[in-house]
Amino acid sequence: MASLPTILVTGATGFIGRHLVRQLSRDGTALRLLVRSQAKAEALFGSQFELVEGEVTNPDAVERACRGMRQVYHLAGYYEFGRRHQPELWRTNVDGTRHILAACRRAAVERLIHGSTAGVLHSVGRPRTHRDFPTRPPTGCHYKVSKWEAEQSVLRAAAQGLPAVIASPTAPLGTGDDRPTPTGRVLLDLLQGRFPVCPHTGFNVAAVEDVAAGLQAVGERGRNGQRYVLGDSNVWLRDLLRQGAQLAGVRPPRGLVPWPLVALGGLAAEGWAWLGGSGSSRLCWETAYYARQRQFFDCTHSHSELGWKPQKTLAETLRDALSWFATFPHTRPVRPPVQTEPVTSR
Ligand SMILES: NC(=O)c1ccc[n+]([C@@H]2O[C@H](COP(=O)([O-])OP(=O)(O)OC[C@H]3O[C@@H](n4cnc5c(N)ncnc54)[C@H](OP(=O)(O)O)[C@@H]3O)[C@@H](O)[C@H]2O)c1
């Protein structure tokens, strides 16, 4: 007889969530999923999991989902850039997390794994680590402010005794990013020829399967009240796009655009949106502001404490993501593998 689930996953139908569900259920572990659409969940996973339909913004739905659970992986979240997304960001990421915390307390769960983002961490002049959680909310980005605020709530709850641990992915890439998230959109834009130039910025990417394995490791071996950064390769955007273009057989960006011009573009886009034009999540003040920063990470703490290490190379990760996005409209097909130079700048 199939066992009853004791593990809940929220955000299971999302990009990271679907990989986490596959990771956790590999050995036949029963799961309960809190989903907004039963049809979407069944299209992804068939009928093998118990489903609770509802929104994290609805305390009753969250309460029903958490009841009887021993572990909760909370990945439901809203990830967009631009001022117009602020109300939805707050409702989903901040209020939603607070409902999860309250329900976990009432259900006396043994462990909450909170899906935050490494993007809230900040340091100057060196790669960021798990220790770099700022005492004040980040400036210039509503998404980051909402995730910072949610993480603060989790830290407070952990200090008051809730067995909660924080997982902070950097930028996952791979298959299944069907929305796509802002990170995946970079590669989709490359395939659609929408990247003639790029800013001089750098970030950390990881294969989404490795992030899912990292989340499981946090759930099994993370310490309560701690944060674990789940990332892999530090890479300049220009180099990532060059390697991606080489793999896909498309034109790479022709050059770098200086930051003042990016900032001007971001401000102009904001002005246009303010005048009633359609706002863009690609170019707005928030994306311009962060294009100036180098968001590199050092994940050795996660490696040593969790015994977790990413398995996929950057080229494999890129290839998976590009093949996935090549099925989208207006993209060039990705050609067979070619040898590329490693581009990481660890
Ligand atoms: N992707 C990244 O680059 C990245 C990096 C670091 C951290 N994160 C964090 O990781 C988490 C998952 O991100 P993702 O990349 O998988 O995003 P995603 O593909 O947009 O998935 C978001 C998931 O949350 C669900 N969701 C959204 N609003 C909800 C609500 N009100 N009630 C219930 N479920 C809701 C979505 O349901 P539907 O399927 O119905 O839309 C989906 O399953 C988020 O918390 C995000 O902040 C993402």
Image (cartoon, helix red, strand yellow):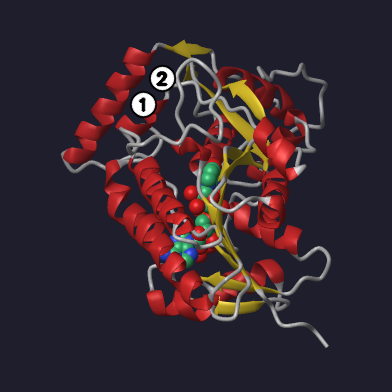
- Whether disc 1's CB lies below 8 Å from ligand 1 is answered no
What is the number of the mark on residue 267?
A: none
- Amino acid type at circle 1 is Ala
Q: Which residue is mark 2?
A: 292
In percent of the image, x 50 and y 70: which residue is there?
A: 104
The Cα atoms of the two marked residues, 2 and 1, are separated by 7 Å
Badge 1 marks a residue whose secondary structure is helix
- Amino acid type at circle 2 is Arg
Above or below 39: residue 121: above
Residue positioned most to the front: 160
Number of numbered labels in the structure image = 2
Residue 96, image x and y in percent? 40, 63
Observer-nearest residue: 75 or 192? 75
- Mark 2 Cα within 10 Å, few/some/many (few <14, many 20+)? some
Image quarter where the N terminus lies is bottom right
Residues at circles 2 and 1 in contact by the CB criterion of under 8 Å: yes
Observer-nearest residue: 276 or 128? 128
Q: Is residue 139 left or right of residue 44?
A: left
Residue 72, image x and y in percent? 59, 66
Q: Which residue is mark 1?
A: 288
- Whether disc 2's CB lies below 8 Å from ligand 1 is answered no
In percent of the image, x 52 and y 33: which residue is there?
A: 131
In percent of the image, x 67 and y 45: which residue is there?
A: 211
Residue 33, image x and y in percent? 60, 71
In percent of the image, x 46 and y 54: which residue is there?
A: 159
Residue mark closest to the camera, 2 vs 1: 2
